[in-house]
Image (tube, helix red, strand yellow):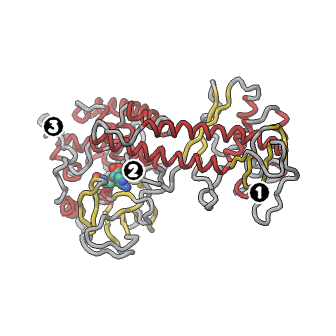
Amino acid sequence: MFCLSRLPKLRPLPRPLLAAAHRLRIDLRCSISSSAPPQVSPRGDEEECGDFLPWLERKAGVEVSSCLSIGKSAYGRSLFSSKAIRAGDSILKVPFNVEISPDDLLPEIRSCKVGNVAKLAAVILKELKMGQDSDWAPYMRCLPQRKEMHSTVFWSDEELEMIKESSVYQRTIDKKVGMEREFSVLRHALDRHFPEVSKDMEFEDFMHACALVESRAWESSKGYSLVPFADFLNHDGLAKAVLLRDEQKQFSEVIADRNYAPGEQVLISYGKFSNAILLLDFGFTIPHNIHDEVQIQFNVPLQDPLFKMKLYFLQRHCLQITRKFGISKCSADNFTIKEVRSAKGKGTGIPQSLHAAVRVLSCTSLEELNDMEEEAAQNDGRLGRRPLKNINREIQAHQLLLPHITKLIDQYSASAKLMNPTGCPASKRGGIRRSMACELLAGELHILKSAASWLEIKESVSGVRNPSLVFWWVPAAGSQSEPSSLGACKSGVRIIRFSCSLLQS
Ligand SMILES: C[S@@+](CC[C@H](N)C(=O)[O-])C[C@H]1O[C@@H](n2cnc3c(N)ncnc32)[C@H](O)[C@@H]1O
């Protein structure tokens, strides 16, 4: 049976890893001797990997592809059609026997308390160290060098400053801290069992190997596996073609999702990834990414007299509330919003969990919290599912959300302006990263703006003489859920109008 295989974000599957251990022990002892050959450098710019496919097919013992050839594009190493391809054609088949997985590690290293990315990174480090003696030397030579990679862990502090508004900023810092921890664990184990491998190994080498894994390994029954040749395929967020894995027949395959004329670059989808994920893990962004999303963070201040109760309610009702709530100084959690449905009908609306959260956070008494829960219980129990009957409370909640989003919009706009895309970057690499930062911020800003305009604000409403706050539900077609009254409260407050049908989506 074929099963869909996705790039690194999915949880790896555990498996027993004893089978390959003996082979590796022999490899290490024989090949990493005192007269170890020079390390293989991943590809130089001049190298075109032209002999790579015949080499891989010899190693696999079968044909891997009869219609693709390796070349270069603006995306780096790429696969091109060498003859006409029709939608539905099988364009490559890579047998599992030429995949690289953490199976190729010794038990002493495999049992290290590090994740699957770090384990596969250790295999790459070992193969690179073995130089020309590595069974994988022709493949290792085709991999991108560190200086060619743009995952944000390689960005300088100054470059990271450009994206400080985005969650990618903090995720990069957290990721680097995690990598440092894993490096020290792995290094300790290598020093102990295989000093030949860890000799002269720097943290930067480990980061490079981890970035290679994250940007080109697929989830497999062995954790993550590198699928040589298939990993020269670049990403198109709209492509339907993906890498398929047939666990029974033991090969990975790609089926063309459209016709290709000879010489065209063939693209697949790595998955439905936002620019935030693409930048963090793959080192690139795509313009107008339909999978973009923004993380919005809310805090419950410790000095809030209802702090504990609100935490309790949030944990109970807000689906996305997870680990971070409950930490000491202030509690916060992230909510993911995608493009909010606009007048054109795109997007998915403000997530229910966020609705629920702002309702809880805006409460000023225990009575309000209890009333809200009681009201939810009369429906399906979910706090964010239906509009509150008490319009004033609903307004209270949205007065918390809208300014929050507006503030983020201002911050994003200021950062985007500071980047000055017309100015001359210090280097080509600096220019590439700056345009990625621009693309990331532009996509996230677009989403924030869509959320703000969804929470449409009007200064007055016809028929209301004195400016007063009116909260107007626009019922979904055929819906009975129009509120019993239009709430008019504090004079001078703005009008919020939004669609009840979206709230219920
Ligand atoms: C699986 S590899 C594909 C082969 C890669 N181009 C190479 O040189 O080896 C993934 C990497 O290719 C590049 N890439 C893939 N799709 C891209 C795209 N749509 N735009 C820019 N870079 C892309 C990124 O550097 C990414 O980390």
Q: Position of residue 100 (x, y in %)?
A: 31, 52
Vertical position of residue 426 compared to residue 385: above or below: above
Identify the element where label 1 is drawn.
strand
- Under mark 1, the amino acid is Val
Residue 226 appearing in the image: no
Which mark is on residue 474?
A: 1
Q: Quadrant of the N terminus?
A: bottom left
Residue 233 visible? yes
Residue at 75% in and 42% down: 494
Please identify, in this view, whether the residue under mark 1 or under mark 2 is nearer the observer.
1
Give whichever of 242, 424 is nearer the camera. Answer: 424
- Which part of the image, by quadrant, shows the C terminus? bottom right
Q: Mark 1 vs mark 2: which is more N-terminal?
A: 2
Camera-nearest residue between 411 and 208: 411
In the rendered structure, which amino acid carries the disc numbered 3?
Ser
Identify the amino acid type marked 2: Tyr
List the residue tagged with mark 2.
224
Q: CA distance from mark 2 to mark 3?
A: 29 Å
Q: Earlier in the sequence, mark 1 or mark 3?
A: 3
Outermost residue toward the left in this view:
35
* Residue bearing the label numbered 3: 33
Q: Quadrant of residue 401?
A: top right
